[in-house]
Image (cartoon, rainbow, N blue to C red):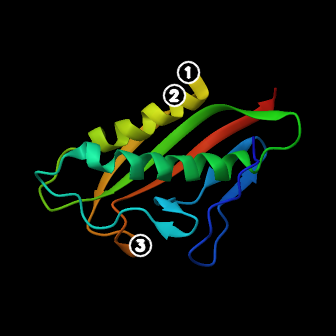
Amino acid sequence: MGKEANPIPQGKYVPATRFGNFIFTAGMTSRKNGVLMKSGKIGLSADLEEYREAVVQAAKNALTAAENKLEEGEKLVQILSITVYVNAEEGFTSQSKVADMASEYFCEVLGEAGVGSRAAVGVASLPGSAPVEISITAAADRA
């Protein structure tokens, strides 16, 4: 854990902060090596599967940022909260389906510890015209 490099901040902030055993990540988009994988609003008639790779990359970026705050001998024991911001056309109502892709990724990697409370929020725009942004709050403890 914590072996991948943190996502590159796009402003004056840190990828994650820690307070006690709680780790809070910044909102992460689907940037890979600093480059946004997909951009633009998700359309009303969009095939959401076309966005899976971008959603998973944003979730992976958040998880990497959280894992990089772990101390030796620790692991993430629970995702406490997931917030998924969806940049979509007005009238789009499938935010939860987009968020499910992130939740599925967290469960694949962490098992039941990847299941947290969640908010899926539709927004008018996101930085760089990213289609999705994800932040998590996680709990760390000794392995």
* Residue 39: mark: none
Left or right for 57, reference 52: right
Image quarter for residue 130?
A: bottom left
Q: Residue at x 58, y 65 (%)?
A: 33
Does residue 24 appear left or right of residue 93 in this picture? right
State the quadrant of the N terminus.
top right
Q: CA distance from mark 2 to mark 1?
A: 6 Å
SS for callout 1: helix
Circles 2 and 1, Cβ within 8 Å, touching? The answer is yes
Look at label 3 and name its amino acid: Pro
Residue 115 in sight from this viewpoint:
no
x 56%, y 69%: residue: 34
Amino acid type at mark 2: Cys
- Residue 140 on image: x %, y %: 74, 36
Label 3 neighbour load within 10 Å: few <14, some 14-19, many 20+: few
Q: Earlier in the sequence, mark 3 or mark 2?
A: 2
Density class for disc 2 (Cα within 10 Å; few <14, some 14-19, many ≥20) is some
Find the distance from the CA under tag 1 to the CA under tag 3: 31 Å
Q: Disc 2 on helix, strand or loop? A: helix
Question: Which residue: 16% across, 58% down?
Answer: 43
User: Distance of mark 3 from mark 2, alpha carbons?
Assistant: 27 Å
Q: Residue 61's spot in the image, x, y percent? A: 57, 53
**Residue at the disc numbered 2:** 107
Label for residue 112?
A: 1
Q: Nearer the viewer, residue 82 or 131?
A: 131
Q: Is residue 60 left or right of residue 56?
A: right
Residue at mark 3: 127
